[in-house]
Structure formats: C-alpha cells, structure tokens
Image: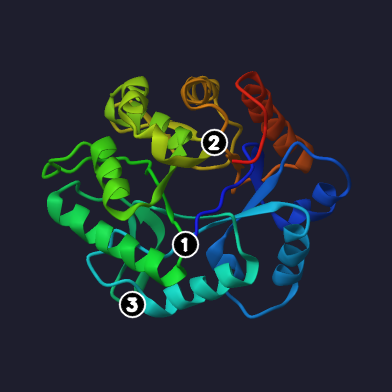
Amino acid sequence: MRHTSLPRAPGVGFKPQHYERILAGPQPIEFVEVHAENYMGAGGPPHAILRHLREHFALSIHGVGLSIGSAAALDRDHLARLKTLCARYEPQNFSEHLAWSSHGKTYLNDLLPLPYTQETLDRVVAHIDEVQDTLRREMLLENPSTYLQFAESTIPETEFLAEIARRTGCGLLLDVNNVFVQAVNHGTSPEAYLDAFPLSRVKEIHLGGHDAQEDETGAPLLIDAHGAPVADPVWALYERVIARTGTLPTLIEWDNDVPDWPVLAAQAHAAGAILARYGKREAA
C-alpha cells in the first residue's frame, strides 16, 4: 500500500476563481485540495486547470461521495472512477469522511452521522479495507461534525476512530472546526476530545469556519458551513494540537460565500505563522 505525505505547511481548498491569483506569484501555501467528485469527468477545463496546478503544488484529493458508513456495499463504479482519478494525478493524500450519504440509488447532499457500535465499526473497517485495496494507497478518515447523538452508541468517537486506524492501517484527517462544532452542540469539552484523539495517526488537518445559530430552546447551535473565517476558539484548539504533534499539513476550507483570494491567503498565512512557531515547514 502506497504511503505519501503532503508538505507540513498550509494549503487551501482550490476554487477555480482563484486559479490565476494562485499562480501569479509566491503564495503562503504549498498544497491544494480538491473534491474528488468534481474531477471524475474524462477531460475539459477542470482537468486542464488541475493538471497545471499539479505541476506547481502538492495535491490532496478529498472525497465526499463514497458513503464509507453506509449499511450497503460501496458503489463499485464510484470507486473505479476514484481509482482512475488518483492514478491520473498521484495525490499525496486521499481522504474521506466518517459518515454515510447514500441509500440504495439515492445520493444525499449531506454527510450523515453514524451510531458508534461494534456493528458499525466492523462495517466501516471492511469498507476502508476495500478502498485501500482498490486504490493501493493509504486513505485518511475525517472526524465528523455532528448535530445529534445516538442512544445506541457504545464506543466513544475518539476510540472508534483509533480502532479503525489500528485495524485498517489508515491515517486520520483531524478537522479541528468539527471538534469545536460538535463540542458546542453536545455540551462537551473540545479540549478533552483532543486529549483523547489518536493524534499519532493524523496526517492532515482541516480548519474552516462555522455558522452560529440557536436551536428551538435558545441553546447555541453551530453549523459546519465552511463559509466564514476560522473562529478564534478554533485557532486556539489548532495551536493546542500543533504544540503536541509538531507541524502537520494544514488545509483552510472555504466552500460557501467564497471570498477573494487575499482573504483566503490571509487565513493560510495565519496557519503558517502557527506552524512556524513549532518547527520548520519541511516535507513530512
């Protein structure tokens, strides 16, 4: 199984409107990340742009459609297209979500939560084994942002992720904003969650913004919307992680209400400043 690594430096989720600015001169990033499903066509402008970017930056491919947690079998056609994409661009990382997003032939535009039971654990392990065997490369699994908890769950999320990584050999993608979002939503401690997280398996970090709302009782409700700057408490949690792990590849996610490039670049620069305090930005 192939293991490669991104630079221990900032990156951004690539948006086509930023293409010319990214290539215009030196930038505070060393890698870009794209959603796999946007590049599963055979050709056209998206591939021409990505091929050119790949000549200048390391690449992370982030999947949103495998439905790793689904009770059904993985979609073999989708997995075959993903294999073709990874072979075409040889990304340093490929990642997916601890979630499900399909039922039968119906695909939902969301990443839905799972009960943390032994049955679910065995199913997710089997699906990740299939993905890694097909791609012949390591997959990273991302921790979710959740808005409810299942009464039937018997395994803490951090233990669930650690056991998946142990049994499959996969890496983990730590989304720090997701940690903060679900801690606020469930009234738990994000610091305690991170203290229990298997940080030694983390190969990439995501940072993004969230939307603050209230539920019907007036309690705070955070939505992982990826449409705002990284919040101060999330920056603080990120620095707490980097202080323990040392430098790690760190992606700024901004998928909705996408700003002009200087705003996104400033977020990447802020991540780079934290990384610089804890070590050289050398290749992982």
- What amino acid is labelled 3 in the image? Lys
- What amino acid is labelled 1 in the image? Arg
**Residue 266: x percent and y percent?**
73, 31
Residue labelled with disc 3: 105
Q: Is residue 178 above or below residue 188?
A: below
Q: What residue appears at the point 25 percent right and 51 percent down from the top-left corner?
A: 114
94 vs 149, nearest the viewer: 94
Tag 1 near tag 2, CB within 8 Å = no
The answer for how far apart the CA atoms under marks 3 and 2 are is 32 Å
Q: Residue furthest right?
A: 24
**Residue 11: x percent and y percent?**
65, 42
Dot 2 falls on a residue whose secondary structure is strand
Q: Earlier in the sequence, mark 3 or mark 2?
A: 3
Tag 3 near tag 2, CB within 8 Å = no
Instruction: For the C terminus, give its image quadrant.
Output: top right
Q: From the viewer's perspective, is the residue at label 3 or at label 1 nearer? A: 1
- Numbered disc total: 3
The numbered dot on residue 137 is 1
The answer for how far apart the CA atoms under marks 3 and 1 are is 27 Å
Q: What residue appears at the point 48 percent right and 20 percent down from the top-left corner?
A: 240
Residue labelled with disc 2: 207
The answer for how far apart the CA atoms under marks 1 and 2 are is 24 Å
**Residue 233: x percent and y percent?**
49, 21
Q: Does 182 sit left or right of 175 as displayed?
A: left
Q: What residue appears at the point 31 percent right and 40 percent down from the top-left corner?
A: 147
Question: Which quadrant of the view contains residue 185?
Answer: top left
- What amino acid is labelled 2 in the image? Leu
Q: What residue appears at the point 63 percent right and 23 percent down from the top-left corner?
A: 274
- Callout 3 environment at 10 Å: few (<14), some (14 to 19), or many (20+)? few
Question: Which quadrant of the view contains residue 213?
Answer: top left
Q: Does 117 sit left or right of 262 as displayed?
A: left
